[in-house]
Amino acid sequence: DNVTQKRLLLACIHFYDKKCIKPQETLLQYILSKKEEKADGIIWGGDCNHEYKSILPDGFSTPASSCARNEENGSWVYPTSNSKKIDWIFYSSSNGCEEEETVLSSFTSLESEAFVKSTAEAFDCMGGYTLSDHLGEATTFIFS
């Protein structure tokens, strides 16, 4: 970013284990190699074709907007598409400099919330179905 001088590494993925050997491991290995080049933040995600349940990729968080607390037992509950949550957004802060910590945080904006809700809408022209069997994911990020 020319204004803040922050560097952000972005990766949009579609993992498919049947046609690629260890796609997540390959991506994370590449991302971690770029972390050393002083990226201030890393965001990656897409159709992971994997349910992470309570275990996320090491060193990454998922936006709070992607999950909710079960009020009875406090566990995380993930929204689902066809009873599975396979579309994800992960993020991590890293500026490679211990003296000055950069924090990348996420929040749900009105725009990101509206987008996610719109992906669950059924259309008459689609026979009463949604445009995809996947729900959209969106969040807003800010450096602090």
Image: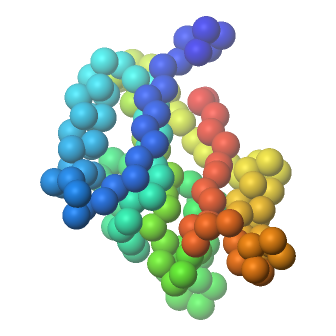
Q: Is residue 78 above or below residue 89?
A: below
Q: Residue furthest bottom?
A: 72
Residue 54: image location, x then y, percent: 39, 72
Q: Is residue 30 above or below residue 67?
A: above
Residue 61 visible = no
Image-based side of 67 in relation to 90, left or right: right
**Colour scheme of the rendered structure:** rainbow
Residue drawn at the location 54% of the way across and 81% of the way down: 82
Could you tell me which quadrant the C terminus lies in? top right
Query: In the picture, residue 29 is in which quadrant?
Result: top left
Image-based side of 88 in relation to 22, left or right: right
Q: Is residue 107 above or below residue 64?
A: above
Residue 131: image location, x then y, percent: 68, 66
Q: Residue furthest top?
A: 2
Q: Residue furthest left?
A: 21
Residue drawn at the location 30% of the way across and 35% of the way down: 31
Residue drawn at the location 75% of the way across and 80% of the way down: 127
The residue closer to the viewer here, 57 or 114, is 114
Residue 81: image location, x then y, percent: 56, 75
Residue 130: image location, x then y, percent: 70, 72
Image-based side of 94 in relation to 118, left or right: left
Residue drawn at the location 61% of the way across and 8% of the way down: 2
